[in-house]
Image (tube, grey):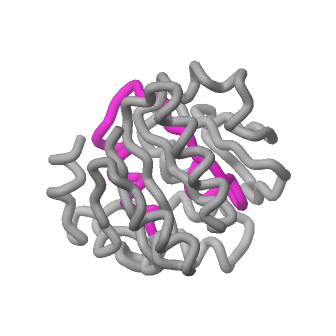
Amino acid sequence: MKELIKNITNNDLDSIDMDDFKYINSLEYQDYYKRFSSFEHYRLLKYLSKNLDNETFLDIGTLKGCSSLALSYNKSNNVISFNVTNQLDLNYYPENIEYLIDNVLNEKYVDLIIQSKIILLDTNHDGIFEQQLFNRLEEVGFKGILILDDIYLNKQMKSFWQNIKKDKLDITHIGHVSGTGVVFF
């Protein structure tokens, strides 16, 4: 997985079809979704989905549904998207996505975490929940990759990112302009 991520280029990502933007109701979020790599991370998510088969991905922080939509690109994969409130704003979503209004840290989701290959974390960016999820992944023996959005957004996220001692890559150059990091568990 690390080699796959290390070898991704902006050209690889920017050639990906983003026509499913039409499933997003918000014109503002349609625009975000269609942006090129190094501005937004949706093309990166689609690329990873395209290159993995029959996997489970967790999207922590659904918001409008853009990340889950991108992760669902390969229909052989299953995407479970968590949010604590319902802000989903799609007019259609593929059958390989399940939306849950709940806290992923709930004990009943431990097996789901363990079976996941990729976990995308894109929530409040306060460093607190990020650390709680990180600790949970270590506790339960997660063996996949954690993708962190907005690692340079604010002081709290910069500190959280800098204090991670696990094998990690800063892939902002192909991800989101405010920082994208990958941690290998």
Percent x, y of residue 41 = 44, 66
Q: Which of 133 and 100 is in front in this view?
A: 133
Q: Nearer the viewer, residue 162 or 86?
A: 162
Q: Quadrant of the N terminus?
A: top left
Specify whether residue 168 is in view.
yes
Q: At 19% from the left edge and 66% from the top edge, which residue is drawn?
A: 9
The picture quadrant where one finds residue 107 is: top right
Q: In the displayed structure, does residue 101 sit left or right of residue 82?
A: right
The picture quadrant where one finds residue 145 is: top left
Q: At 51% from the left edge and 36% from the top edge, which residue is drawn?
A: 137
- Whether the magenta-drawn stretch holds residue 4 is answered as no
Most extreme residue toward the right, as rendered? 85
Q: At 15% from the left edge and 57% from the top edge, which residue is drawn?
A: 7
Q: In this view, does 148 lie above or below 99?
A: below
Q: In which quarter of the image is the C terminus?
A: top left
Q: In the displayed structure, does residue 21 sit left or right of residue 50?
A: right
Percent x, y of residue 111 = 57, 19
- Whether the magenta-drawn stretch holds residue 48 is answered as yes
Q: Is residue 163 above or below residue 56?
A: below
Q: Is residue 1 above or below residue 155?
A: above
Q: Nearer the viewer, residue 139 or 108?
A: 139
Q: Is residue 35 above or below residue 86?
A: below
The picture quadrant where one finds residue 82 is: top right
Q: In the displayed structure, does residue 85 sit left or right of residue 12?
A: right
Percent x, y of residue 53 = 34, 29
Q: In the displayed structure, does residue 168 sit left or right of residue 24?
A: left
Q: Which of 28 and 39 is in front in this view?
A: 39
Question: Residues in magenta?
Answer: 41-68
Percent x, y of residue 75 = 47, 34
